[in-house]
Image (cartoon, coloured by chain):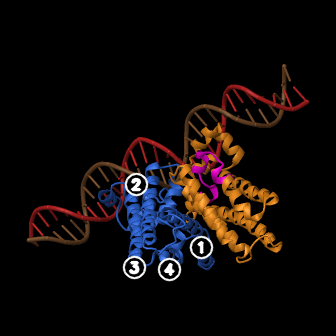
Chain colours: A blue, B orange, C red, D brown
DNA sequence: GCCTTTCTGAACCAATCGGTACAGTATTGC
DNA sequence: GCAATACTGTACCGATTGGTTCAGAAAGGC
């Protein structure tokens, strides 16, 4: 998964995978079927893990603090190596949008479920009066995802993590103003 | 360029290019050298054209209206087909960040020059008192680019243009609050 | 200690990749 | 109408792509 994450689907060759996994070619096909099937499983795994982050945070944090928690655990509080890989879902969408509709749709669907998790938390907070109702929960979630996407693109450039920090802070500040 | 734009560098094969360009294989190599060299030229062309959009708008518009003008001419006022291709520079960064450092750097550098164009316009507006000085020109430009990246990722998903419109409007509204 | 399951390593497949070479055909300039 | 330039079509190159097959070695269960 880490290989696919870093290099994308096409640029990751079978020999690359075999060497990293430390298994033989025949074992690979016996266990995982095809390269495409393995990539699909990796996409699902990555998407589910990311969704878990949001849902776990939503259990114990005020919704207004959700975006910061999410950006910290996916951009700020990870190694420089990892932040440079960006988000595997976003990478996949941009690599395969006009090449492989199925994989694109799978990634888009996972992203959509993450956006929904944000929207649900915001919706609940608005009903309990914790959150300003100037914008709908869906609009707020959509804004959070837009900023998230933007940050992931910034991450994947050659930016140092120091240069990334103020971008995250300013984005959060801007989001706060909008909520 | 349109082919590279839509499918990315790796997924665009030489036969694809030849068919679209309507020339023979030997003519291709005689005129453009290698596939990689052509891609470089396309990146430069795309980057320069995008930079032109910002610089031309900056000549006749108030800096506060620059982001809206930019998003209109790159996201809202283009065909559904075209908006689905996203931004070639962003696509390239996400496809090749951990695969081809040189091409990644070229795309990143072009994006940086676009960001600088925004920063210059904002800087001038702050000196003349047109713009709030709560945030530095560089910070504002960085925010605009982050939003821009986010919108491009949204565009490249299977979103209809109708679904994209409110996202752009909300993003602009959020940006306005931050400025 | 034996039998079954698991895995390896290498050979092999057809297809495609980017790139080169070159003879032959259009097209151009004058 | 002739010569120079531009372009085509095809064959070819080595390398690499994802995927298959299978005999043999290693490991595990009891």
- How far apart marks 1 and 4 lie (CA) works out to 24 Å
Please say whether residue A30 is visible from this viewpoint: yes
Relative to A114, B98 lies left or right: right
Residue A37: name its quadrant: bottom left
- How far apart marks 3 and 1 lie (CA) works out to 23 Å
Which of the marked residues, 2 or 4, is nearer the chain's N terminus?
A: 2
x%, y% of residue A68?
51, 76
Residue B154: name its quadrant: bottom right
Q: Magenta part mainly helix, strand or loop?
A: helix
Q: Nearer the viewer, mark 1 or mark 2?
A: 1
Q: Nearer the viewer, mark 1 or mark 4?
A: 1
The subunit letter for the residue under badge 1 reads A
Write down the residue under mark 2.
A36
Write down the residue under mark 1.
A177
- How far apart marks 3 and 4 lie (CA) works out to 19 Å
* Residue A108 magenta-highlighted: no
Quick one: quadrant of the N terminus of chain A?
bottom left
Write down the residue under mark 4.
A77
């Amino acid at each position: 998964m880490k290989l696919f994450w870093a290099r994308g689907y096409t640029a990751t060759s079978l020999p690359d995978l075999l060497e990293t996994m430390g298994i033989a070619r025949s074992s690979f096909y016996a266990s995982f079927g095809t390269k495409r099937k393995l990539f699909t499983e990796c996409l699902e795994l990555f998407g589910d893990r990311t969704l878990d982050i949001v849902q776990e945070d939503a259990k114990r944090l005020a919704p207004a603090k959700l975006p910061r928690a999410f950006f910290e655990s996916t951009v700020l509080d990870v190694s420089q190596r990892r932040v440079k890989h960006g988000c595997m879902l976003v990478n996949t969408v941009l690599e395969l949008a006009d090449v492989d509709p199925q994989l694109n749709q799978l990634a888009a669907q996972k992203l959509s479920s993450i956006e929904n998790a944000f929207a649900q938390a915001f919706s609940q907070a608005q009903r309990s009066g914790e959150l300003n109702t100037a914008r709908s929960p869906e609009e707020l979630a959509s804004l959070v995802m837009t900023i998230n996407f933007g940050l992931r693109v910034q991450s994947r450039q050659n930016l140092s993590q120091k240069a990334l920090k103020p971008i995250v802070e300013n984005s959060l500040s801007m989001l706060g103003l909008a909520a």
